[in-house]
Each structure stands twice: as C-alpha cells, then as structure tokens.
Image (cartoon, grey):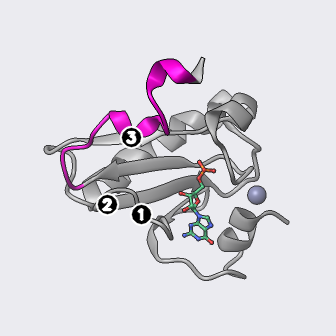
Amino acid sequence: MCLFCKIVNKEIPSNIVAENDDFLAFHDINPKAPVHILAIPKKHVDSFHEVDPTIMGGMTEFIKEVAEKMAMENSGYRVITNIGENGGQEVKHLHFHVLGGAKLKWEHFSDSHPMENF
Ligand code: 5GP
Ligand code: ZN
C-alpha cells in the first residue's frame, strides 16, 4: 500500500484539514509556503495522467473548499500537481499541492536557471 493510501487509512497520522467520503486534505510534512496542503482522492490513482475525469469534478470542488477553509479565496493561492519523473512526482498517489498564505514566487519551480533544464 502506498504512503498516501496509508494516510487515508489513518495507519500513518496526518494533520487533516478537510475530509469527505471521496477526498482527504492534510498539511504537507515539509511545507514550501505558509499554507501548504495536499488534497488527494481516497481512491488510489497513480497521477493526474491516469485520473478519471469524473473524480476531477469532485476534486475541483474539494480543493476550493480547502482554500476557503484556509481563508485563501480572496488572497489567492496556487494548485500544483507533479506528474512522473520529469514533473518531480515523489509520491505515486495523485495529490494536488494547495499553496498560499503569502505572495508566491514563480522562480522556485526550477532548481537552476530555467534554460539550463533543456
Ligand atoms: P510530490 O513531490 O510527489 O509532488 O509531493 C510529495 C509531497 O508529499 C512533498 O511535498 C512531501 O513533503 C510530502 N510528504 C511526503 N511524505 C509525507 C508524509 O508522510 N506526510 C505528509 N503530510 N506529507 C508528506
Ligand atoms: Zn495510494
């Protein structure tokens, strides 16, 4: 069973922000912004590339709920999902990073100068 499935099953503790029958949101263990939450479907899906579009409808609403819970709907926030090797995905269970709480930089997405990556 993957790490996030274990979090869904409460075999591994997490700091939960929101939960319903289909989705779970919890604080990232290594936050990269003042607010850094991971929103996931409870059903295991490897990545965004494999997700059934019917799950994404509920996922969208759930992410908005999380943003509102963290009072970010007016200040703004960022949603990211990393996919596979080049996307930098470390945990192979679909998750959306919901980041905010401060004006976010864009540059931090690259470990080096952008053009050095190609
Ligand atoms: P990825 O790199 O796959 O897009 O993101 C994985 C995220 O999961 C990382 O931001 C990492 O800090 C977070 N993470 C890894 N293990 C745990 C854990 O056991 N608990 C929590 N809450 N977050 C985790
Ligand atoms: Zn899983």
Say which of marks 3 and 1 sits in front: 3
Residue 25 position within the rendered picture, expressed as x and y whole percent measured from the top left: 49, 62
Determine the image quadrant of residue 86. Answer: top right
Is 11 on the left or on the right of 25, as rendered? Answer: right
Of the image marks 2 and 3, the number of the one nearer the N terminus = 2
Looking at numbered disc 3 in the image, what kind of residue is underneath it? His
Q: Are marks 1 and 2 in contact (CB under 8 Å)?
A: yes
Ligand 1: which quarter? Answer: bottom right
Name the residue tied to disc 3. 108
Name the residue tied to disc 1. 31
Name the residue tied to disc 2. 35
Residue drawn at (66%, 44%), measured in percent from left and top?
Answer: 89
Residue toward you, 108 or 36: 108
Is 85 on the left or on the right of 55, as rendered? Answer: right
Q: Dot 3 lies on which element?
A: helix
Q: Is mark 1 within 8 Å of ligand 1?
A: yes
Instruction: Measure how far apart labels 2 and 3 are at the Cα level.
Output: 16 Å
Q: Is mark 2 within 8 Å of ligand 1?
A: no
User: Are there few (<14), some (14-19), or many (20+) residues within 10 Å of tag 3?
Assistant: few
Magenta segment includes 102: yes
Magenta segment includes 78: no
